[in-house]
Image: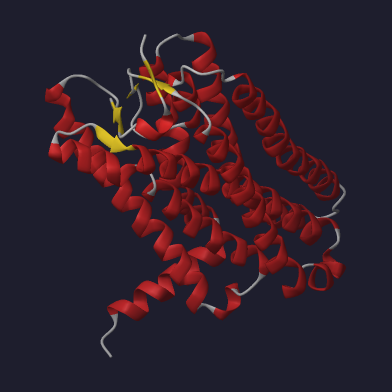
Amino acid sequence: MATINQTAVSEFLLLGLTDDPAQQSLIFSIFLSMYLITILGNLLIILAVSFDSHLHTPMYFFLSNLSFNDICLITSTVPKMLVNILRQDQSITYTGCLSQVCFVLVFGGLENCLLAVMAYDRYVAICHPLLYTVVMNPHLHVPLFLLSLVISIVHALLHTLMVLRLSFCTDLEIPHFFCELAQIIKLACSDTLINNVLVYLVAGLFAGVPLSGIIFSYIHIVSSVLRMPSSEGKHKAFSTCGSHLSVVSLFYGTGFGVYISSVVTDSSRKTAVASVMYSVVTQMLNPFIYSLRNRDMKGALRKLIGRTASPP
């Protein structure tokens, strides 16, 4: 098979979720609806936190940043897919593809870090309530967010720069609806050993450390809650963690589901369909989970909607 240098690559082809032209209009409608729902839902969360002074706490600071991150993550993949369907054109430029890889890694990694930081926030609030205002002050929770962002950017740039060293075959078809790192590496004709080792090494470290932190936090949270004498206190403590735990389960559950599907099936197209869960559906459901399971958030949303609906 002929090999071309990466500097000569002008574009890749995103094959999408199906080869059936009759299903393209249906896929376009579904993804456009999910995209608009995600934007609207997460934007409402951000506005509710911004306009309600009662929600100016570290917990909701991280939540509003998580919502903004979800908007960025879904925007880095879905609009290009929708444009390609409208134009009936599967191409994406080489630069655009690498940019998409980088942005997906940045925002996916930041979501991973934010969920871990939010778990630590709940750990301090429940296990050390008297120290909460001292520990989770602006001098800590803002640097925690910035550190998460820096780590995510370094992680994304590391993989993206390593892709630049690869040479590609003339077959540049990606059986996915966006440029995923693993699919790009598979297309390379040059040696990808370093890239593959780096993917597993960094993924184990970058996903394992936050997940271990989340598990550690919730072990101590559950232990503290079970020692509470009143059932009302237990219910209140669990209710403050329920939304976050649901989002964590959804994010990591769908991520592991995609990994398992890639192991048990040889079909890249089926893996692409499975990846819709963690790259699109999770971002769409997060606002509903937090707004439906959180009393303070429901109150803030009602006040926000009432403020916008009432005449000046």
In the image, residue 200 above or below residue 211: above
Which quarter of the image is occupied by the C terminus? bottom left
In the image, residue 114 above or below residue 263: below
In the displayed structure, does residue 65 sit left or right of residue 96? right
Q: Mark yes or no: residue 302 visible.
A: yes
- Residue 73, horizontal then vertical, whole percent: 45, 48
In the image, residue 292 above or below residue 253: below
Farthest residue toward the bottom?
Answer: 312
- Residue 167, horizontal then vertical, whole percent: 46, 24
Residue nearest the observer in this picture, 143 or 185: 185
- Hey, which quadrant is residue 271 in on the image? top left
In the displayed structure, does residue 294 sit left or right of residue 269? right
- Hey, which quadrant is residue 53 in on the image? bottom right
User: At x 44% / y 9%, what residue is drawn?
Assistant: 266
User: At x 76% / y 57%, what residue is drawn?
Assistant: 233
In the displayed structure, does residue 168 sit left or right of residue 234? left
- Residue 185, horizontal then vertical, whole percent: 49, 24
User: At x 34% / y 59%, what residue is drawn?
Assistant: 40
User: At x 43% / y 68%, what residue is drawn?
Assistant: 301
Q: Mark yes or no: residue 179 visible.
A: no
In the displayed structure, does residue 64 sit left or right of residue 124? left
Residue nearest the observer in this picture, 88 or 308: 88
Count the marks. Answer: 0
Residue nearest the observer in this picture, 261 or 75: 75
In the image, residue 278 above or below residue 76: above
- Residue 1, horizontal then vertical, whole percent: 37, 8
Protein image colouring: secondary structure
